[in-house]
Amino acid sequence: MRRSSIIRFAAVAMTSLALLSTTPRSALAQAASQLSQAEAANKALVLDFWAKVFDAQDWTRAKDYLADDYIQHNPNVASGLAGFNAYFSKIWPNPKSATAIIATEFVAVVTQGDLVQLVMRRSRAEPGNELKTYDSYWFDLFRVKDGKIVEHWDPALKPVRN
């Protein structure tokens, strides 16, 4: 009698393990894999946008990456693709030549769901002593939807007027 109870217990345990491995865990692993693919695509889009638009200073390429109704949280730039183009066309009237492009070196690229954050180091002149510099760290955060950048945040401030 005891032997049959052990066999029944083992059979129930093995069946339970088989069911667990084929339902929620398997579905969860598949969803996590798909999410990782989406995050990788979002990261690639944002990095390509940075290289083609910011590093190359070519605002005309923004249409390939930004949604028309793109939301901009930088107080100096209006929302929308038109707002982006109006601002950056004044700063970058002509794209850099291929030999003049310097790729941004990111300290970190963090991707979570539909968000991609770029962190970069910038050397700045020391106030009061232009011969010395210090490092400052800046970030840009992007939200991606359907293969386009739909929102952007950065720590920009309005320029001080004298």
Image (cartoon, rainbow, N blue to C red):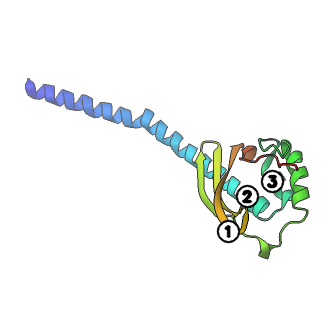
Residue at 56% in and 44% down:
34
Instruction: Please tell me whether mark 2 sits on a helix, a strand or a loop.
Output: helix
- Residue farthest along the front direction in this orientation: 128
Residue at 64% in and 61% down:
135
User: x and y percent of residue 89 in the render?
Assistant: 90, 57
The answer to which of 87 and 36 lies nearer the viewer is 87
Q: Along the polypeptide, which appears first: circle 3 or circle 2?
A: 2
Q: In which quarter of the image is the N terminus?
A: top left
What distance separates the C-alpha of mark 1 from that of mark 3? 39 Å
Instruction: Please tell me whether mark 3 sits on a helix, a strand or a loop.
Output: helix
Which picture quadrant has residue 56? bottom right
55 lies above or below 11:
below
- Three-letter residue code for mark 3: Asp
Question: Dot 1: within a 10 Å radius of its alpha carbon, few (fewer than 14), some, or many (20 or more) residues?
Answer: few
User: x and y percent of residue 154 in the render?
Assistant: 72, 47
Question: Dot 2: within a 10 Å radius of its alpha carbon, few (fewer than 14), some, or many (20 or more) residues?
Answer: some
User: x and y percent of residue 130 in the render?
Assistant: 73, 67
What distance separates the C-alpha of mark 3 from that of mark 2? 12 Å
Residue bearing mark 3? 64
- Three-letter residue code for mark 1: Lys
What distance separates the C-alpha of mark 1 from that of mark 2? 28 Å
The disc at residue 50 is 2
Q: Between label 1 and label 2, give the one nearer the viewer.
A: 1
The disc at residue 132 is 1
The disc at residue 9 is none
The answer to which of 4 and 91 lies nearer the viewer is 91
Q: Between label 1 and label 3, give the one nearer the viewer.
A: 1
Instruction: Please tell me whether mark 1 sits on a helix, a strand or a loop.
Output: strand
- Residue farthest along the top direction in this orientation: 1
Give the side of residue 58 with respect to residue 34, left or right: right
